[in-house]
Image (cartoon, rainbow, N blue to C red):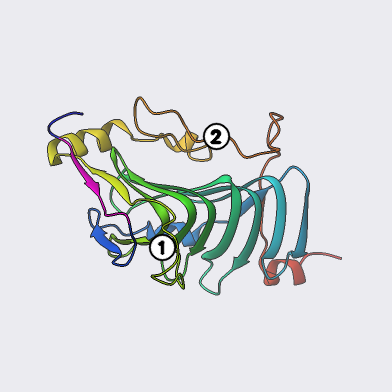
């Protein structure tokens, strides 16, 4: 173990959740001004006008710097052109960049619930949240993109008497190392739609089950109701 690392290990129970803060973060506000692009290998069902859809197999959603990968994903577009998503996978993944920075937040879990309007990300099952080399793991993580605060613990509603599902674990890097890691982890814009990378020396999470190696189809931008109703007949 590197003696400079401070490893945060909670006790064997989740009676008291861990509430900590990463560096202050605000998801890029310009993201919601950009098109929501989606693609999937199998199918899509839903209302293309309202932006509500369910997509299956090797799903990719992008909007600006926000990227979501999943086996199955339920998508809903909000009135402010942000989107909500429930992503399922082994694991599903989420990445977004913060304002005025190349610093990204990356998350992996069996289930990811993203509320783009409120800036909240919830991770369920084998959850991992990363910022550079700083990371936290648990069965449930709730992360507020607006404040940088996250909560790690048992899944909401789990009684204190329930068997312990696992330990809360994490790594707080020294500030100098964390800043350097963030600089080294800058992602070129042309790679924004690629799967997120993990910290150096650590294998990337397993690919989603059933995902194919065939190229992903070009994303299709969602059209507004005005564009659809004014299209030439």
Horizontal side of 232 relative to 165 (left or right) equals right
What residue is drawn where x is 40% and y is 51%?
166
Q: Give the farthest residue toward the top.
A: 201
- List x then y, in percent, for residue 45: 78, 60
Per the image, label 2 sits on a secondary structure element best described as loop
Magenta stretch: residue 54 in it? no
Q: Which residue is mark 1?
A: 154
User: Label 2: which residue?
Assistant: 206
At horizontal 71% and vertical 60% (from top left) the residue drawn is: 54
Q: Which of the pair 229/11 is nearer the observer? A: 11
| Residue furthest right as drawn | 233
State whether residue 107 appears in this view.
Answer: yes
Q: Tell which tag, 1 or 2, sits nearer the viewer.
A: 1
The count of marks equals 2
Where is residue 39? Give x, y as percent: 68, 47
Q: Tell me the magenta residue range.
A: 5-12
Q: Earlier in the sequence, mark 1 or mark 2?
A: 1
Q: Does the stretch in magenta take in 8? A: yes
> If the image is split into quadrants, where does the N terminus sit?
top left
Give neighbour class at mark 2: few <14, some 14-19, many 20+ (Cα, 10 Å): few
Percent position of residue 61, x then y: 59, 50
The one nearer the camera, 113 or 67, is 113
Task: Report the quarter where the C terminus lies.
Answer: bottom right
Question: Residue at 28% across / 51% down in the picture?
Answer: 100
Asked whether 168 or 85 is in front, the reply is 168
Secondary structure, mark 1, is loop
Could you say where residue 67 lies in the image, as x and y percent from the top left? 51, 48
């Amino acid at each position: 173990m590197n003696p400079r690392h401070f490893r945060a290990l909670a006790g064997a129970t989740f009676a008291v959740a861990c509430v900590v803060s990463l560096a202050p973060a605000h998801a890029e506000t310009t993201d919601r001004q950009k098109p929501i692009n989606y693609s999937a290998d199998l199918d899509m069902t839903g209302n293309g006008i309202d932006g509500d859809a369910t997509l299956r197999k090797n799903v990719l959603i992008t909007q600006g710097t926000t990227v979501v990968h999943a086996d199955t994903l339920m998508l809903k577009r909000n009135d402010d052109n942000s989107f909500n998503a429930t992503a399922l996978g082994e694991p599903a993944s989420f990445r977004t960049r913060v304002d005025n920075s190349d610093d990204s937040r990356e998350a992996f879990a069996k289930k990811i619930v993203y509320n783009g309007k409120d800036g909240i990300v919830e991770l369920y099952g084998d959850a991992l949240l990363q910022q550079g080399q700083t990371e936290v793991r648990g069965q449930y993580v709730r992360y507020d993109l607006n404040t940088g605060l996250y909560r790690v613990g048992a899944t909401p509603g789990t009684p204190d008497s329930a068997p312990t599902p696992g330990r809360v674990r994490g790594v707080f890097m020294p500030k100098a190392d964390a800043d350097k890691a963030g600089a080294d982890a800058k992602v070129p814009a042309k790679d924004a739609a690629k799967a997120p990378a993990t910290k150096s020396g650590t294998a990337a999470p397993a690919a989603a089950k059933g995902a194919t190696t065939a190229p992903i189809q070009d994303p299709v931008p969602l059209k507004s109701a005005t564009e659809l109703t004014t299209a030439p007949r």
